[in-house]
């Protein structure tokens, strides 16, 4: 049922391409960042698994085609166009950077090469899934960085922009470095570790707080996390401590976390529960966590919800999907935009990553050693060829490990929670610059 998960203009253009006899032209589109969000120095690429699933399963159901036929925008579309849609499958190629890879503006995250209609229709879905998951994975990496080795769990489904977004947010947050999610569907579908015990309603449903704790411990044993702030945080902690082991620890969801965590730690230690852990939740973000860490609050784990699942301070990414070349009758034509502040690079491209900087190159350029003798990492790799998967995708645990390693390789300055200048260097090769100048002259000056 993927066919209609797109913007209408993708389909009106598809009908127009068909009518103009352009259906068999082969297009190359690239999906990339126009700019970084505020205070970000990188973006973690995520969402490739869902993009691949979409491309491999793209088709139109008869009922969807009937719906299109009744729209006013398609009253002049030839009947053969709808027959074309009924047969449509993705038959093209996909190259992509591995999920979990830090990327920067102008660098292709995905490259699609396919018959023009196929390559056009997929734009909306690809932008949505890559943009959303990359946004959340990046936010997660920042929160995890601020936590300085303490565990972070994604808690945001109830505040996500939809239940479906909550599932993908749990996946993306794990890629970004969280140890798991509260979203059970993310655990079921992707193998993300799941966490959670009880809410305030559990405590309120019993006549006494101690009885609610006793019953929770009876159920969960060593996984028990007592939510101790329903009535009085310190009294709740004393009651939890009085039950002794087994327990994981306690969770604080309100109040001054610096002061409370210190007093809670003292109560647990005095009860001999030195190994019991303290988790805090409640409107957490990377900056609040950074302050708690700087204050040396004895907190072992953070539950981060709304701010993570919605990336509240930067709730969207400036991802774009642009036509970079078109082939027709054996002739290749390079394309680019030259409008103010929206200029793009023509031609299919590759990214070569060296220590501390990247080269943006034409796709058929060979990687060169750096002056220091370093062989670059070639970022875009084949994923789909002629509509068939050619590369086994890693599981979410492998993606997470790749993301953590890749971030460690970034110069430390770019892992900061604050924007730094100069930005990470992405240098176009001389050949790519020459191609851009040639295309600019062709379109703006009318010279070949």
Image (tube, rainbow, N blue to C red):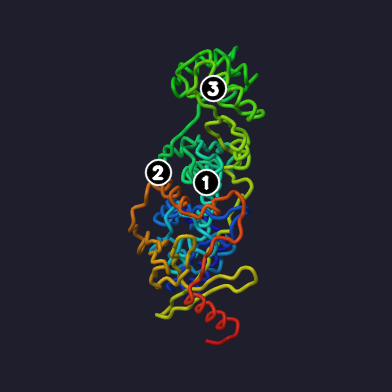
**Disc 1/disc 2 C-alpha distance (Å):** 15 Å
Q: Badge 2, how many Cα within 10 Å: few under 14, some, many 20+?
A: some
- Front-most of residues 100 and 16: 100
State which tag comes first along the sequence, 1 or 3: 1
Q: Secondary structure at mark 2?
A: helix
Q: Badge 3, how many Cα within 10 Å: few under 14, some, many 20+?
A: many
Q: Residue furthest bottom?
A: 447
Q: Secondary structure at mark 3?
A: strand
Q: Say which quarter of the image contains residue 336.
A: bottom right
207 on left or right of 379: right
Q: Which mark is residue 141?
A: 1
User: Residue at 48% across / 58% down in the picture?
Assistant: 65
**Disc 1/disc 3 C-alpha distance (Å):** 27 Å
The residue labelled by disc 3 is 226
Please provide percent x and percent y for residue 414. Answer: 55, 54
Q: Badge 1, how many Cα within 10 Å: few under 14, some, many 20+?
A: many
Q: Residue furthest right?
A: 256
State which tag comes first along the sequence, 1 or 2: 1
User: Residue at 59% across / 33% down in the picture?
Assistant: 296
């Amino acid at each position: 049922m993927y066919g209609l998960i797109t913007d209408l203009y993708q389909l009106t253009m598809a009908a127009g391409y068909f009518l103009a006899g352009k259906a068999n032209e082969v297009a190359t589109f690239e999906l990339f960042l126009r700019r970084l969000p505020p205070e970000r120095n990188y973006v973690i690429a995520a969402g490739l698994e869902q993009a691949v699933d979409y491309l491999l399963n793209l088709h139109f159901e008869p009922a969807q085609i009937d719906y299109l036929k009744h729209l006013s925008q398609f009253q002049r579309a030839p009947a053969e166009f709808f027959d074309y849609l009924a047969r449509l499958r993705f038959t093209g190629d996909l190259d992509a950077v591995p999920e979990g890879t830090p990327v920067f503006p102008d660098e292709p995250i995905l490259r699609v090469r396919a018959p023009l209609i196929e390559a056009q229709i997929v734009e909306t879905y690809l932008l949505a899934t890559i943009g959303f998951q990359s946004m959340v994975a990046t936010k997660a990496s920042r929160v995890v960085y601020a936590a300085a080795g303490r565990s972070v769990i994604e808690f945001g489904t109830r505040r996500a922009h939809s239940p479906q977004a909550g599932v993908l947010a749990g996946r993306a947050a794990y890629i970004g470095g969280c140890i798991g999610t509260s979203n059970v569907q993310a655990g079921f579908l992707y193998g993300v570790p799941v966490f959670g015990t009880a809410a305030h309603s559990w405590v309120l449903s019993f006549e006494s707080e101690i009885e609610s704790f006793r019953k929770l411990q009876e159920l969960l044993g060593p996984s028990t996390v007592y939510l101790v702030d329903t009535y009085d945080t310190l009294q709740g902690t004393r009651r939890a401590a009085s039950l002794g082991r087994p327990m994981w620890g306690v969770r604080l969801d309100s109040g001054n976390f610096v002061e409370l965590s210190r007093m809670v730690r003292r109560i647990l230690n005095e009860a001999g529960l030195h190994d019991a852990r303290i988790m805090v939740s409640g409107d957490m973000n990377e900056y609040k966590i950074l302050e708690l860490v700087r204050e040396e609050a004895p907190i072992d784990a953070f539950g981060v919800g709304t701010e993570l699942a919605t990336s509240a301070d930067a709730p969207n990414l400036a991802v774009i999907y642009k036509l970079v070349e078109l082939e027709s009758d054996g002739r290749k034509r390079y394309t680019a935009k030259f409008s103010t502040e929206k200029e793009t690079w023509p031609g299919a491209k590759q990214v070569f990553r060296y220590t501390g900087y990247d080269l943006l190159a034409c796709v058929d350029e060979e990687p060169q050693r750096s002056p220091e003798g370093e062989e670059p990492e070639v970022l875009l790799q084949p994923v789909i060829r002629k509509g068939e998967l050619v590369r086994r995708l890693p599981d979410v645990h492998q993606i997470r490990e790749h993301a953590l390693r890749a971030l460690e390789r970034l110069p430390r300055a770019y892992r900061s929670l604050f924007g730094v200048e100069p930005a990470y260097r992405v240098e176009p090769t001389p050949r790519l610059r020459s191609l851009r100048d040639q295309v600019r002259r062709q379109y703006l000056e009318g010279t070949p």
